[in-house]
Image: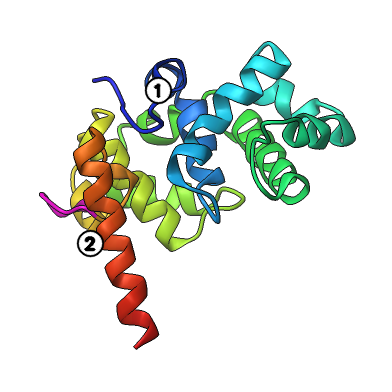
Amino acid sequence: MALHITGDDAADDLLTQSPLALIIGMLLDQQVPMETAFAGPAKIRDRMGTLDASTIAAFPEADFVELFRTTPAVHRFPGSMAGRVQALCAAIAADWSDDAAQLWTRGDPDGAEVFRRLKELPGFGDQKAHIFVALLGKQYGFTGDGWREAAGAYGEEGSHRSVADIVDADSLAQVRETKRAAKAAAKK
């Protein structure tokens, strides 16, 4: 299944083909538009010449921050987010044999186990883990038992709450409207 998140065919193809790109995009999805966050892995790959967890983890920290800062920036907070991506990649390299997909494939895990594994990663709290389980189940072919329950409200069929629900420009607009309405309700 092809992902359509960024509006850029090459970036979306990388997300579709590379589990590491997808999980890095999810990590970057904070305080920037979703399209910007999920386009980040393509910028990293283009600037480094590779997208490999071990290579990213071992890259000199100052050089990786500069790579994030280069225009167009990977993220609006290059220093902190570069560090988070390197910490995430170090965990994937050390704990998951340099293969992000093992988070949801090793040992045929159910949804609750994938959620637990995600929460152990640097930068992944409850909400990010729920959304990523939903993304895996709705668009990435993950069929582990109980994935919808593990995704919480983000796993509901027909919802338009997160990146897990974006399949085209119309669904992106629906997700944006749901988020806008939630922010407006929270202000009241």
* Amino acid at circle 1: Asp
> Which residue lies under the disc numbered 1?
12
Asked whether the viewer can see residue 1, the reply is yes
Front residue of this view, candidates 65 and 96: 65
Q: Is residue 1 above or below residue 138?
A: above
> What amino acid type should be assigned to the residue bearing mark 2?
Ala
Q: Nearer the viewer, mark 2 or mark 1?
A: 1
15 relative position to 2: left or right: right
Question: x and y percent of residue 162 in the render?
Answer: 31, 51
Identity of the residue drawn at 31% across and 26% down = 3
Give the image location of residue 128, x and y in percent.
44, 54
Indicate the position of residue 169 as horizontal and vertical percent values: 25, 36
**Residue 85, label in figure:** none
What colour-coding does the image apply?
rainbow
Residue at image position (49%, 54%) is 119
Question: Is residue 83 one of those drawn in magenta?
Answer: no
The picture places residue 80, in percent across and down from the top left corner, at: 74, 51
Answer with mark 2 or mark 1, whichever residue precedes in sequence. Answer: 1
Task: Decide: is 136 above or below 182.
Answer: above
Q: Which residues are magenta?
A: 155-160
Left or right position of 171 against 62: left
Mark 2, residue position: 153
The relative height of residue 14 versus residue 142 in the rendered view (above or below) is above
User: Could one spot residue 152 in this view of the protein?
Assistant: no
The correct choice, above or below, for 90 with respect to 155 in the image is above
Work out how far the residue at label 2 is from the one at label 1, CA to CA, in angstroms: 25 Å
Q: Quadrant of the N terminus?
A: top left
Q: Secondary structure at mark 1?
A: helix
Density class for disc 1 (Cα within 10 Å; few <14, some 14-19, many ≥20) is many
Which image quadrant: the C terminus?
A: bottom left
Pick out the residue farthest to the left: 158
